[in-house]
Image: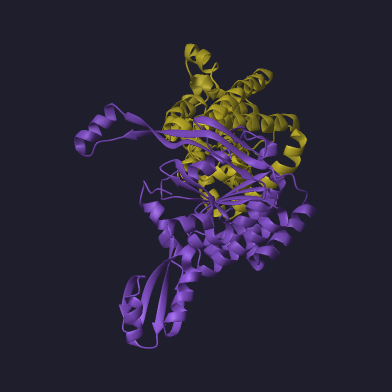
Amino acid sequence: MVQNIIDVRNLSKSFDISTKEPGLKGTIKHFFRRETKSLKVIKDISFEIKEGEIVGFLGANGAGKTTILKMLCGLIYPSEGSILVSGHLPFRRKENFLKNITLIMGQKQQLIWDLPPIESFYLNASIYDLDKIEAKKRIKKLSEMLEIDEELFIPVRKLSLGQRMKSELLAALIHEPNILFLDEPTLGLDINAQRNLRKFLQKYNKETNATICLTSHYMKDITSLCKRVICVQEGSISYDGKLDLLLKKLSPVKEILIVCRSEEDAIKLENSGFTVKNKIKNEITIKIENNSITSSLKTILNNFDIEDLFINEPPIDEIIGKILIKKDYDI
Amino acid sequence: MISNLINRKLFTLLKVQYSNMLEYRVEIALWAISGIIPFFMLNIWTNNNLNEYINISDVMLSRYFLCAFFIRQFSVVWVVFSFEEDSLMGKVSPYLIQPLNPFFRYFAQHLAEQITRFPFALIIAFFFFIFNPESIWIPNLGILLLSIVSTFLSFLIQFLIQSIVACLCFWTEKASSIERLLFIPTLFLSGLLAPVVSFPAYVKSWIYLTPFPYLIDFPANLLSGNETNISGGLSMQILWIFLLFPLFKKIWSEGTKKYTAMGS
């Protein structure tokens, strides 16, 4: 049986935020008396993640996804509740724990700006107690997987964003961690770079059975990497389960574009009881529930003269967008 | 474990940071030049014959200020500014989840910068001797070694003081303003502007209870050959390190609990 590598129970996090009224009066008041309020950004959440799982955290900006990742990797202290990652309390930041994890933030970098990435790799290797031979071996292996070569010897400041991100990944993975926390790793990358990065993460997960926790606003990252998603809404978990089940729940109907041989057939079809979205000449778009697609299509093909037929999957961004925009969306 | 840390981690850090510092060699040369305050002070002291009040000859005074310049070059600390920026911008986050305290990075940066500074400081000293040939002297090997140790201890004291102040970033965000406050006693009481011996006796007795005279005055007197209590000075330096280190560890451990990873 695959065991849980991350176990979170009743976790909450509050931040003290100082508030200020606008205008000169507010500024003066703020100067003499600071008013702070406690903002609960994570509210009593619980979940567990199994070894080797890739889990996507979904949510609008400010929902609390990154805060959860920061607590999981031990960067910030939880206010309440418990976290166990690989048997450790993350915020204690014990050496054995730190050697097992990595955190990659799309908008932050750890590479030394004015030096070629190779220098940062060897530095990280020594921080993680790798000898030079082992470090060389790992750099070679990872650079092959990431398809980077001569970029290793060019100062970081001269690299493109994609090349830099690949180098960041290499630096973050040189100690072969078995838990990866990725906070928007494809942020700002072009389509090809995003695809390559996803391919790499899939490969890494397959080869090392590493557990990956990922946040991203690019739905392609989530759909191609994660079977399971955790939706975070205003600090609470609104859904924790399989991605395809979520999609079915959020989008129970499919749209089917039917091209009839004649306009008369289209009119007949329009009046045959299906839910029609629109009709233009001999083309008609109808909505059919997911669980009756086969039988409905059979009926249509048997009773109408059809020239062509297209089943349109609703765009995933649109579906997920629903839960991000609508705060009280019932999943 | 400690030997592994010093042998491998710190050595690699130092190597990498030295390569990084060499990228900034022009800036470091300018920084070295900007540290010539002791030479201005020497000028003020000798032009006004102030040294007569403290029974130090012109030659010994010029050696003192040259040594003060050297000690300052190798004990300048700016960790509070680097840490504050990194902390506010969230750059410190990736370092916090590595099995090495981020302050080792700053420590290596400082050491690497000192190595880079060394040739520029020598050039400045060379010009100093051209204009003050009577000040040329060669300290004996023992004194030279003790001075190097004392300068390093001075650097450690300043590094620990600033690191403690830097950790206040976890509470105040703008810890560098506290450092500005500390800069005043550092400037006046360390011996950078005037040898501590020139202060009135009752002030001196208080000054020697603070860490400041052990930052510049003691190592500069030691290296220049002025009369000084070597074992007393070194003991006080070590004592201050022993007092400051646990304080740093405590404030670091409490501070990281407050860290909010802003900007990341």
**Residue at figure coordinates x 77%, y 58% from the top left:** A137
**Residue at figure coordinates x 69%, y 36% from the top left:** B138
Q: Is residue A314 above or below residue B205?
A: below
Q: Colour of chain B?
A: yellow
Q: In this rendered view, identify the residue nearer to me: B14 or A137.
A: A137
The picture places residue B102, in percent across and down from the top left corner, at 60, 39
Q: Is residue B138 above or below residue A129?
A: above
The single residue placed furthest to the bottom in the displayed view is A262
- Whether residue A56 sits left or right of residue A252 in the image: it is right
Is residue B58 among the parts visible in the rendering? Answer: no
Q: In this rendered view, identify the residue nearer to me: B180 or A191.
A: A191
Quadrant containing the N terminus of chain A is top right
The single residue placed furthest to the right in the displayed view is A133
**Residue at figure coordinates x 75%, y 29% from the top left:** B142
Q: Is residue A290 above or below residue A6?
A: below
Q: In this rendered view, identify the residue nearer to me: B188 or A66.
A: A66
The picture places residue B216, in percent across and down from the top left corner, at 56, 29
Is residue A330 among the parts visible in the rendering? Answer: yes
Toward which corner of the image does residue A303 lie, by quadrant?
A: bottom left
The picture places residue A23, in percent across and down from the top left corner, at 20, 39
Toward which corner of the image does residue B133 lie, by quadrant?
A: top right
**Residue at figure coordinates x 48%, y 18% from the top left:** B199
Count of residue discs: 0
- Whether residue A26 sits left or right of residue B17 in the image: it is left
Q: In this rendered view, identify the residue nearer to me: B133 or A1.
A: A1
Q: Colour of chain A?
A: purple
- Whether residue B53 sits left or right of residue A37 in the image: it is right
The picture places residue A193, in percent across and down from the top left corner, at 55, 66
The single residue placed furthest to the top in the displayed view is B202
Q: Is residue B201 above or below residue A197?
A: above
